[in-house]
Image (tube, rainbow, N blue to C red):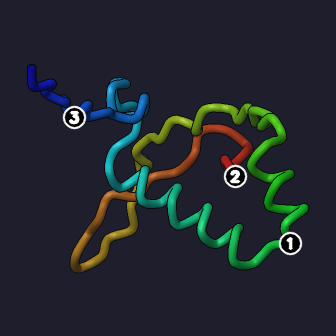
């Protein structure tokens, strides 16, 4: 009696999860991780990769509005200004 051995092809759990980042975002994260590994001490890299991230809450960007009065110029363009006193950082 001959036994047949089947090769099990495995996928990482990441491959079976739906993507939440674009390929460009994934590449950017890889580049950032590589930068940390190359330029930080081992202890700093461990801290960066394992400490929970804190969420920074920023106010939404100020809505833009058209300025009513434009100076007369040869090639006019639309001028926009912020309607609030802060600029998002």
Q: Residues within 10 Å of mark 1 (few under 14, many from 20)?
A: few
Residue 16 falls in image quadrant: top left
Kindly identify the residue that appears in the image at 73 percent across and 31 percent down.
Answer: 57
Kindly identify the residue that appears in the image at 42 percent across and 51 percent down.
Answer: 25
- Residue under label 2, please give it: 89
- Which x, y percent locates residue 51? 84, 40
- Residue under label 1, please give it: 41
In this rendering, the label closer to the viewer, 3 or 1 = 3
In this rendering, the label closer to the viewer, 2 or 1 = 1
In this rendering, the label closer to the viewer, 2 or 3 = 3
* Extreme residue toward the right, this view: 43
Residue 59 falls in image quadrant: top right
Question: Is residue 18 shown left or right of residue 49?
Answer: left
Q: In the rendered view, would you say 74 is above or below 67? A: below
Question: Is residue 79 shown left or right of residue 31?
Answer: left
Kindly identify the residue that appears in the image at 87 percent across and 62 percent down.
Answer: 44
- Residue under label 3, please give it: 7
Mark 1 residue element: loop
- Which x, y percent locates residue 88? 66, 47
């Amino acid at each position: 009696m001959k036994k047949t051995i089947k090769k099990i092809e495995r996928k990482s759990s990441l491959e079976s999860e739906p993507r939440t980042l674009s390929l460009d975002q994934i590449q950017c994260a890889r580049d950032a991780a590589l930068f940390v590994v190359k330029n930080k001490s081992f202890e700093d890299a461990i801290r960066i990769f394992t400490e929970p991230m804190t969420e920074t809450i920023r106010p939404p960007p100020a809505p833009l509005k058209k300025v009513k009065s434009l100076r007369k110029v040869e090639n006019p363009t639309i001028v926009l200004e912020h309607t609030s006193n802060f600029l998002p950082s």
